[in-house]
Amino acid sequence: MAKKARKAAAQGTNGSAKKAAALTARDKKTLKDLIGLADRIVDDAQKKRDPYIDIPTRALSNVRYNKTRRRIEMGSNKNRRQLFNLSQAKSYMQTVLVASGCKQLIEQGKTTSIRGLYYLLKHTIEGTREETFDDQAECDPVIEDVEVGLNSLREELHVYASNRGNLVGPLTLVDSGDEIDCSRMGSAGYSIPSIVEQDVIEFKKCTAKFILHVEKDTVWRRFSEDKFWQKHNCILTHGGGQPPRGVRRMLNRLHNELKLPIYCLLDNDPWGYYIYSVIKQGSINLAYESERMAIPDAKFLGLRSRDYERCGLSPSVKINLNEQDIKRAKQIASYPWFEHKKAWQKEIEQMLSNGFKLEVESLISKDISYVTETYTPARLADGEWLD
Amino acid sequence: MAKRPSKNGQAAELDDELLEKDEAAASAGQNGDAPRRKRRATAHSMAASQRDISVSEFFAKNRHLLGFDNPRKALLTTIKEAVDNSLDACEEAGILPEIWVHIEQTGTNRYKVGVQDNGPGILKKQIPLIFGKLLYGSKFHRLRMSRGQQGIGISAAGMYGVLTTGKPVKIISKVSRRKPAHYYEIKIDTKKNLPEILNGGGDGVDIPPGEAGSKYIQKHGIEWIELDHGTRVTIELDGRFHRGRGSVDDYLEQTAIANPHVTLHYLDPESGTGQGEERVYERSTTRLPREPKEIKPHPYGIELGMLVTMLQDAKAMTLSQFLTSSFSRVSPSVASRICETAGLSTRANTTKIGRNEADKLFQAIMQTKIGAPATDCISPIGEELLLKGLHHVVPGEFYIASTRPPAVYRGNPFLIEVALAYGGMSSANRVPLDVLGELLAESDARTLRQFLSSTFYGLGSEAADKIIKEAGIGPRTSPGKLKPAEIARLHEAMRSVNLEAGQTMNVLRYANRVPLQFQHGACAITQMVMQTNWRSYGLTQSRGQLPTGPVTIMVHVASVWVPFTSESKEAIASYPEIQKELRLALQSVGRKLGMYLRRRLKVKQEGERRNIFLRYLGEVAGAVSEINRADRKKLYDQLLLVAKRKTASADLKLDERGKVVDEEPTDFGDNVLIVEQKSDFGIRNSEAKNGQKGS
């Protein structure tokens, strides 16, 4: 039993009979960090200084592309968040609130979703009509701030995101003690949890040869119903658009621990490119987690800009690029991890000269199972993908 | 001197030649295209109908030029002319003016207006001419600041009265205690522009003092307040009485602002029916304005034709004598310089100056540097009295006044004064419920929205919409058809809605202390106020519009000859010199207002800043103590200390009541008045007084 926890229980000033749970070593470290944060504030107040919290900047300006490791890494820039600064006062208060919420969760040995934490901390500020958080969108980035600020992971703060993303394939795993055969999960497949670390999920048995990651549920269902994973002996995943951390971590573990290559089938638009980019070298926002998330060997299988002609698609599936798309595409093309890849530059250029984008679903216009029976097998057989 | 064409049409030789040429050209044209047609009228037949037009006939037809274009304005103009004359007379005689204005309704759209003053009175033989002849007066020919200028006003009002009601103008005047008052009933003969005296066999009547006199007066349907000297004029006319913008009430209130030495008694039509009571605007100073001196014209203001006429009128004298005696600011040395430039001898006799010489002389005058005219012909209200007057009538929290040094346009000295009041509630916030009911009943506005924006100053349509919405009444409701409950709701809404945002600046225009109430768009004052960039002084303003905010600005143009755009004296013409002075005056008050608003904003912002910090301190302290079990209270107090240090400037200027304490009184310079805002504090104060009375 940790000394701190005992002390806390003994003091019990909050009056609630909260039961202190057994703390793991990781919990102890996180608690220590949280208390350190609070102690600094007390210290500053005593010395009549402006209290502040330094939070690493989560922006493109503060990420670096590590060429040897082939992933995005976070720089050392920090944003100072001050209590006595008009524009930061509220977010400062929110940051401290989130820290205290996480501390409660850890002490009680419980976890909650980010939405749950939002409700836990949401209340009216005393003497005003202002809420601590107006909506969840205001709370989520603050949780990320605390993660980065304390250099700890979301699960270490006992917070998880809601599940998004499914998996099907010849894989058996143990999830919180339950053995699950992912090939026998019915039509909806196995729902990938937010936290997939080793203490939660353990891989038991896997016969798959590769992983096919698709963008969204519709396409995933097509593949799943057509039993593509059986025919090709693979694991089939989707992340509901931009894959959440659970999905990315899962892919990362499958790739690294089971040595499975990963192929992505995404839309032919800037958004699809960026999803691939995030899977491959990590996201700008969560650059500090790239190490656990990025899969530098992931391949981009489709859709390609040339597929409209190659597959003879009907003109009605074209979606015109809007101004924002064009801007975004140019931005992506200039990312350092795309900048020097000729194939990618050509790909993006072609999309821009096409003037339209294509969704994976557009292949369905050829034939319902065109994507599973013709398109994907052909690409895999030809070994034609972008890296 | 060359022969000039006389008025009767006896053309000079030169002109004959011209005529012949014209005719030749015309006939050539006619021969060219069409057969000669028979003339409709010959020169002889036309000459038979050509005749003189009398001024009074002209103005009877063109009464809109004098401000009698509609019944509403007619009533106001009548009162205005009478009051202006009274004030001029009193000030000229050095008497502290006291004026009685009495309006009585005598029929639908028919009112009897009586205006009395305590002035010097008018000599018996002058009365008919002053009140019964257009363009008769003492003020036209002299250069001196006065309210009246042309000698049209009051006689035109009388003429209008006679035209619309057939009732004569009734005048009582008393010049001293020892002499009896004269009573005249006068009609103006519009054909001849001459007065026609109706009573006493064309000679007027002397009213005996005492009982008999007052009985006589009562019998003739006029009132006379017993005074040692003074004049009362009573005119019955077709008119409309209304309240709000451009009303008699407004005119008198604004007159009181610009004339703090005047006491005004005002009985409106309702007072006769026992509903209202006499309103009195007490004077706030007993000091009469400095008597303006009469001056000679300044050479720069003269035109060639005028110079020629003056030379002709002058008795035989040397040129030097002529220049020094007929113009101001021309000393013998200036005169000799002018003559030198013109190439004329200073000793030249004025009778020998021909057209060419006059032209040369005129050019020389314009080229010679001559000092600005003396400015003692203008009597400004003065910054102190401006502040007093404005504060007396317009509620606010910040007052500033500025009087510019005199300047000259076209040789006429003039002077600009500006006073500004900021803050305070708008009239719409202050109106009592019963008055609102009256206003609604009287209004001829078709919709409630129109009523609100036309009745209250500075209330834009935006604010009107807000009020109507708040009251929950249909915006197209007719103001006369509101139920008492609805009126109560409207009143409540008018009090509660914050009007500051949509309120536009209230511009009060004055010319020689007379408020101008119409044609504000055409007036140089309004135009300059709009052109001034008030945004840099902390007000909001759309381009080319009046700024918004709780601001009242008063602009006074004083001059020996105010350049009005028409005889009805409603708008001031835009001379570049006047525009420049207006701009400078507006900017000088604007700068002070900006300083005040910035300081106010800073204190407010600092206060807000602290509020924001304070709001979150409790949360932060709570969360921190949750994490590390620190003492919440102690942490909170420590953070509070830091917060106070960070927002120290909010502290500096707030005393224990949270009121702004002026620590830098020298900041604004002179002629600034800052009034503590009346909050509920004022009510508490009055309650306390009541309590004392009770005990």
Image: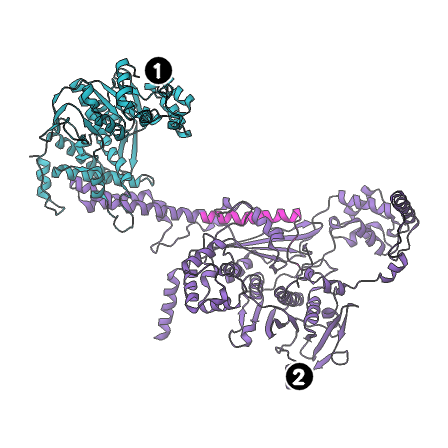
Residue A17 in the image: x percent, y percent?
Answer: 10, 45
- Marking on residue B339: none
Name the quadrant of the C terminus of chain B. Answer: bottom left
What is the chain letter for disc 2?
A: B
Q: Which residue is mark 2?
A: B216
**In this rendering, which labeled residue sits more in front, label 1 or label 2?**
1
Query: Which chain is in cyan here?
Result: A
Q: Which residue is mark 1?
A: A343
* Mark 1 crowdedness (10 Å alpha carbons): few <14, some 14-19, many ≥20: few
What is the chain letter for disc 1?
A: A
Query: Which chain is in purple here?
Result: B
Q: Which quadrant of the view contains residue B31?
A: top right
Q: Main secondary structure of the magenta part?
A: helix
Is residue A185 shown left or right of residue B695?
A: left
Magenta stretch: give its range.
Answer: B568-597
Looking at the rendered structure, whether the residues under marks 1 and 2 are on a common chain is answered as no
